[in-house]
Image: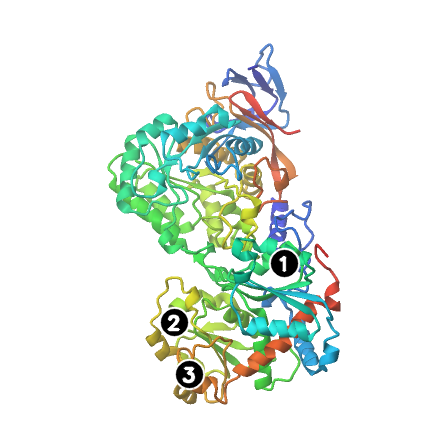
Amino acid sequence: MSTLTENRKPAAVRAKAVPAPSVKHAEVPAIIHSASIHPGSLLSISDLSLEDVASILESADELEAEPAIRRAERLFKRRVSLLFYESSTRTRTSFELAAKALGADTSLVSAQSSSIEKGESLKDTGITLRALGAECIILRSPFSGSPYLLAQETGLPVLNAGDGMHEHPSQALLDLRTILQRLEKNGKVSDKLLDGVTVTICGDIFHSRVARSNALLLPRLGARVLLCGPTPLLPETAAGMSHNVSIERDFDKALEQSQVVMMLRIQKERLAGLSVDLEQYTSRYQANAERIAAHAPKAVIMHPGPMIRGLEITSEVADGPQSGIEQQVKNGVAIRMALVLRAVGEAAKTGKGKGR
Amino acid sequence: MAAILIRGGHLIDPSSGVDAPRDILLNEGRVSAVDAPGKIKHAGAEIIDAKGLVVAPGLVDIHVHLREPGQGYKETIASGTAAAAAGGFTTVCAMPNTVPVNDSPETTRWILAPERGASIRVFPIAAATRGSMGDALTEYGSLKAAGAVAVTDDGKPILGDAIMREALTTAARMNLPVIQHAEDTRLTGGCSMNAGALAFKLGLRGMPIEAESGLVERDLRLLAQVKDARAHLHVAHLSTKAALDAVKRARRNGLRVTCEVAPHHFILTEEAVSQYDTRAKMNPPLRAEADRAAMIEGILEGAVDAIATDHAPHAAHEKEQEFERAPNGITGLESALGLSISVLHGRHRMPLGRVISLLSTQPANVLCLKGRGSLAVGAFADVVIFDPAKKWVFKAIDSRSKSKNTPFDGWEMTGQVLTTISEGRVVYRRS
């Protein structure tokens, strides 16, 4: 039957920000989550075209270079809410500093000191923030996909600051900026910009939203991504994420091919019964001075933080000349200024969602 | 109750092999005559004109959650059976995972009491173990006497070998089927969708196919050990090719095993949750395309015994949560016929009579519901009249169910129910 076939596709894509293809007969389905996703949102790195990535990077450069006073006029007195259901140092502070640098007022709601503790739902928390004038919500949540729910329920631009094991798109963008700076890739963003570059992501890939966002983004710019880690932390299905992503369980072999190495923390809070022998893990996957000197003496060493020194990385490497870790943190503010501006600024005014 | 004469329709009754223009007379709650058009005369009968329509046995759903006792905010027996009637069903079998669990004759009788306001026939399925805890069997004899037609711990599979063997053995003596929700929960802790590349990408823990097929295989080994020809295992909401293959093998070896498949498992794939749409979250989860295609193939080749909806209503506030927090389940009673006709008859050219059989005659046979799923003279006057070619758009908001959690909202379907008659009473009439 043809009409049902035709209706299947729109049903699957209906919540996307891009306009769905026209649905024959059926009206726009009345979804429980009734609003559409605001185009200023960033929920998954896959939402961004390469042109979007280019303009975010350009905007980050521009904002970083701008005199602070002028920059603070960009979003003067606009309201940005940070909704953090999980603890965070870098992401929260850099989003907050980014919004404030643009002149916005920020308010922070965290799980421990709000009505979330009393059982208020994400939907109601979002609607409350919207009623209080929030024009954008930056969400960190332990639940994969929660930014989709918040974006649909509020109609506001939502920036995903890390959702469960799913994604951390702003991290992937600041990592990209760091990689481009360190490898001195000054060309135009394209699917060939990182041709010939191999990036190893090593550690607890299964629980890592950083790994997912990077593994989805970097191959689109031409890079090859090697995932490295023991089977419980790196299932074979991970290689199916994107083209140009493969698994290399031998860390030394991966290092020898890599210009960039991203180390990840073992997420003890998400292990949920998995047992990992930390001593064995350290001997196989730790980025230490001897290993890096032997197998990747020129590679850029990165880490999204928080680091557990002595476990996945040693101080010699984290603080050494190959480390890009501090630069990553600094880039966080520039990238997040660009994302907040994209969400709230003039460009975001077209196609506003419900409740605006 | 006045007699009803349905005239001018095309009668499809898989139980008697009729697929032809026939008039049918319903009297005293039973089918009293079936004959060529114009042949039946009955003074005083209400006449229903079924010209251009199909007249079929009322549909039988052997897997629904009516939520009473205890969760009337999701559904009541009254609202759930009203939804069933609107979907063309005249018989539903109610799963025991209520609050409290239906593990006693008292609860079974409570469900059957006229005060519940059921508009069609409800057959309770009782818990196989006390509290569905998997430790000690319930009283199968007294549960059957109270009206239960099968036993199951649906939603909480029976994992222990000894207790499952005991359930199969004891149920066999009572001539009751044991229905298993086949999920090895030791492999699915914290999981909210099908395992695979998409689950990895979405950052969701996935239920492996083996969690289903492994438990089906275990159950079939146990069934083979029970030396009683009456022992009958029914696999609920089967969703994987591996499990279906196991059922087919066991059947070839002479075991008495039956299985059901839900419309969502032969129509949707895991892609439906790629935007974390909780309306497509259910257990077993939507699988990959290969498994969906295997369900269609199994239905077409006759390996699947019944279509059952696993109608599982949940309140809006429960579904509008983070994906991993939202409960499993979708409603299904009002979309099952339209979806089945659209996909099986429309797309895969299955004769309409076989679609009807999968939705009425066969499920009635699986649970030995005598006089159901049939329009033979003497059978219960359970009838659905539908327009097999009518295209319509299913809207959740119009549902008679208390809950609207369906991924099929807004879908255009072919085949619309116009009248449903339960034991001689018109219980639904499309206005």
Question: Is residue B414 something one can see in this rendering?
Answer: yes
To which residue does mark 3 refer? A314
Q: Distance between the residues labelled 2 and 1?
A: 35 Å
Q: Which of marks 2 and 1 is in front?
A: 1
Task: State which quadrant residue B234 falls in.
Answer: top left
Residue type at numbered disc 1: Ala
Residue type at numbered disc 2: Pro
Contact, mark 1 vs mark 3 (Cβ under 8 Å): no
Q: Is residue B33 above or below residue A121?
A: above
Residue type at numbered disc 3: Thr
Q: Are marks 2 and 3 on the same chain?
A: yes
Q: Do labels 2 and 1 share a chain?
A: yes
Residue B216's spot in the image, x, y percent?
35, 47
Q: Would you call the spot at circle 1 few (<14 residues within 10 Å), some (14-19), or many (20 or more)?
A: many
Question: Is residue A194 something one can see in this rendering?
Answer: no
Task: Tell me the element at label 3.
Answer: loop
Q: In this view, does A29 lie above or below A149?
A: above
Q: Would you call the spot at circle 2 few (<14 residues within 10 Å), some (14-19), or many (20 or more)?
A: some
Q: Going from the N terminus, do you reach mark 1 or mark 3 first?
A: 1
Label ID, residue A230: 2
Q: Nearer the viewer, residue A2 or B322?
A: B322
Could you tell whether B15 is left or right of A222 in the image? left
To which residue does mark 1 refer? A151
Q: In which quarter of the image is the N terminus of chain A?
A: top right
Task: Tell me the element at label 1.
Answer: helix
